[in-house]
Amino acid sequence: MKAVMMILPRLFLALWCAIYAGVATAHEFWIEPEAFQVATGAQIQAKLKNGQEFEGTTLSYFTRNIARFDVVTGDVVTPVKGRMGDNPALDIKSQQPGLVIVVHETTPSFVTYKAWEKFQAFADHKDFPNILARHAANGFGPAPFKERYTRHAKALIAVGDGAGADRALRLKTEFVALTNPYDAGFNGTMRVLLLDEGAPRADGQVEVFDRAPDGAVTISLHRTDAQGIAAVSVTPGHDYLFDGVVLRTADDSDEAVWDTFWAALTFGVPAR
């Protein structure tokens, strides 16, 4: 009986990791706080989410899936050290008022495309034209083939007044908020800079998920300008997920032929 009890947690871990990889393919990944605004000294809790249309599965804390998990307050970067299976994955006490940036990057996962049409649909959705020509030019064969993907998510949380500013935090790809939605002078336009390996990503697609207080979600597509900046009108009382995907040839992989890097930014706009 003792041996069985020791084996069960390992089986659970293996099963959950398999589920984690399975649900993560071709869906958005984001950090979803229990509240985007908290009082100073209150708990900051946030779930890791994976799904579509700003609804999805909650993923627990497992180190094998985490490449980076930090909470940034001012100039202080604090790694998140949870316990295996923690849900929510983030549960810490806020220390001081200001803008808190939660950062999460995943380890690589792989998906096998058994039919070209599924990959084509993904490429069309995420705005990668001429993907068939690119695939052929690289000398890649027909399906089945593999894609390797990683997630690079940020969330903005206001503690107290939420004063402060986002900044580039050296993610593989990331959104940098150029405006603070919690600032008293916020004018209703969220400006974000989309980076790819630290460089502005010009003419990139930004998919915006807007969730109203009643749970209704609307989706719109936007583009960055020549400086990699997108400006999006947002509504008080709504929560937002910004999503942007980079697709490149996987030159350093013996398994995958394509790499995708997913940037996500979540925040709430205070009801004024």
Image (cartoon, grey):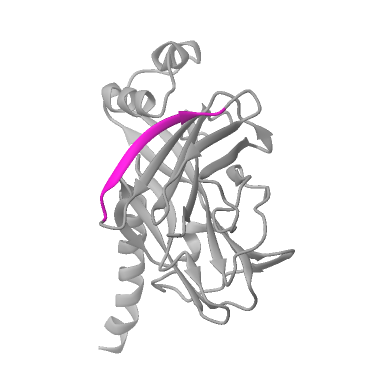
Q: Residue furthest right?
A: 75
User: From the viewer's perspective, is residue 204 above or below residue 21?
Assistant: above
Rendering quarter of residue 94? bottom right
Which residue is nearer to you in this view: 104 or 222? 222
| Residue lying at 36% horizontally and 51% vertically, measured from the top left | 21
Specify the principal SS of the magenta part. Answer: strand
Identify the image quadrant of the N terminus.
bottom left
Which residue is nearer to you in this view: 134 or 58? 58
| Residue lying at 44% horizontally and 12% vertically, measured from the top left | 136
Residue 12 visible somewhere in the drawing: yes
Identify the image quadrant of the C terminus.
bottom left
Residue 76 in the image: x percent, y percent? 72, 67
Which residue is nearer to you in this view: 194 or 172? 194
Which residue is nearer to you in this view: 260 or 189? 189
Asked if residue 222 is among those painted magenta in the image, a careful observer would answer yes
Residue 252 in the image: x percent, y percent? 58, 33
Left or right position of 121 against 139: left
Asked if residue 172 is among those painted magenta in the image, a careful observer would answer no
Q: How many marks?
A: 0
Residue stretch in magenta: 215-224
Residue 115 in the image: x percent, y percent? 26, 25
Left or right position of 76 against 143: right
